[in-house]
Amino acid sequence: METRLDRYDGAREKKFAQLKQLIAESERIVFLGGAGVSTESGIPDFRSGHGIFNQDSGLEYRPVDIISHSFFTKHPEEFFDFYRRKLCYPDAKPNKAHKALVRLERRGKLLAVITQNVDNLHQLAGSIKTIELHGSVCRNYCMSCGAKYTLDFILHSEGVPKCTECGGMVRPDIVLYEEHLDHSNIDRAVAAIEKADLMIIGGTSLTVYPAATFAQFLPHDRVVIINKSSTYLDLQAMLTVHDSIGDVLDATIPKRVRKNPPADVPDKKSKGEKKAVDPGKDIAEDGI
Ligand SMILES: [Zn+2]
């Protein structure tokens, strides 16, 4: 007898199968991801109940105010105190979502990973075609002479990090509130989306601009949404999956690449009938 759970699971399996098929049929995929991609690596998002904006900053200011350009300028010491404690996660590891996107890139099917995250986890997983809309905690520079510094330098400095060359303030190359995004990143993102035949939007509630508008650059019947909560595009997208981004991408992006499958060599020691293995099976199923 079919239970409610069976029906739910069936719907989930059907959606996974649809996405797997879409990925198999597509050649130029763009992924747009938000904080939900990183929460599965233990990095809190900003806006959810346990998000950074709802946490105690440990200071007399609200987190949402601290990560603004004016706060950074007026209170750099407090900014870096908060920044080191709440925005840097040097021990975080890439999760199933990051790894699945690397597989897609290595298959030559991925035009770009456009991310709103600043944690470097896509690159750490092995993605090359990344566009970091909001910058990266791993890039830091002296505001006076431009000298470059690592995340370790920031984490191991005290108070306001100072350039060892000239004594200027060293800041992270991330986009704070009131600051402009790098237009070359937006241009690259839009160019990739315009060339895409499938856009997968994952782990974002699509409330932050400009990423929220990026789906306008290709027909909505080429857009897939994967997010635990609903987004404004859910009804227009061709497929919407309210689920874990890591689970969905891991299940729908093929794991095995065997371009030259070995011929089926029967095992001499085996007795009786051996089920024939189709050497092209993985590839046919994976749609290559
Ligand atoms: Zn300097």
Image: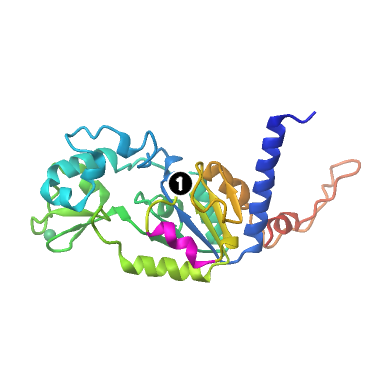
Residue 216 in magenta stretch: yes
Query: In the displayed structure, does residue 157 sit left or right of residue 97?
Result: left
Q: Nearer the viewer, residue 40 or 53?
A: 53
Using the rendered image of the protein, determine whether residue 29 is visible from the camera's viewpoint.
yes
Name the residue: 60% across, 66% down. 27
Q: Position of residue 153 (x, y in %)?
A: 21, 48
Residue interval drawn in magenta: 210-218
Picture quarter with ligand 1: bottom left
Q: How is the image coloured?
A: rainbow
Rendered view: 272 above or below 98: above
Nearer to the camera, 190 or 216: 216
- Is 205 one of the magenta-colored residues? no
Q: Quadrant of residue 48?
A: top left
Answer above or below: position of 184 versus 103. Answer: below
Helix, strand or loop at label 1? It is: helix
Mark 1: give few (<14), some (14-19) or many (20+) Cα within 10 Å.
Answer: many
**Residue lying at 36% horizontally and 59% vertically, measured from the top left:** 133
Q: Is residue 281 above or below residue 53?
A: below
Total tally of numbered discs in the picture: 1
* Badge 1 amino acid: Val
Residue 1 picture location, percent across and down: 80, 28
Counting from the top left corner in percent of width and height, residue 166 is at: 8, 59
Q: What residue lies at 62% left-to-right and 64% top-to-bottom?
A: 26
Question: Circle 1 is placed at which residue position?
Answer: 37
Residue 169: percent from the left, percent from the top? Answer: 12, 54
Q: Confirm whether residue 128 shows in the render.
A: no
Residue located 30% across and 64% down the image: 182
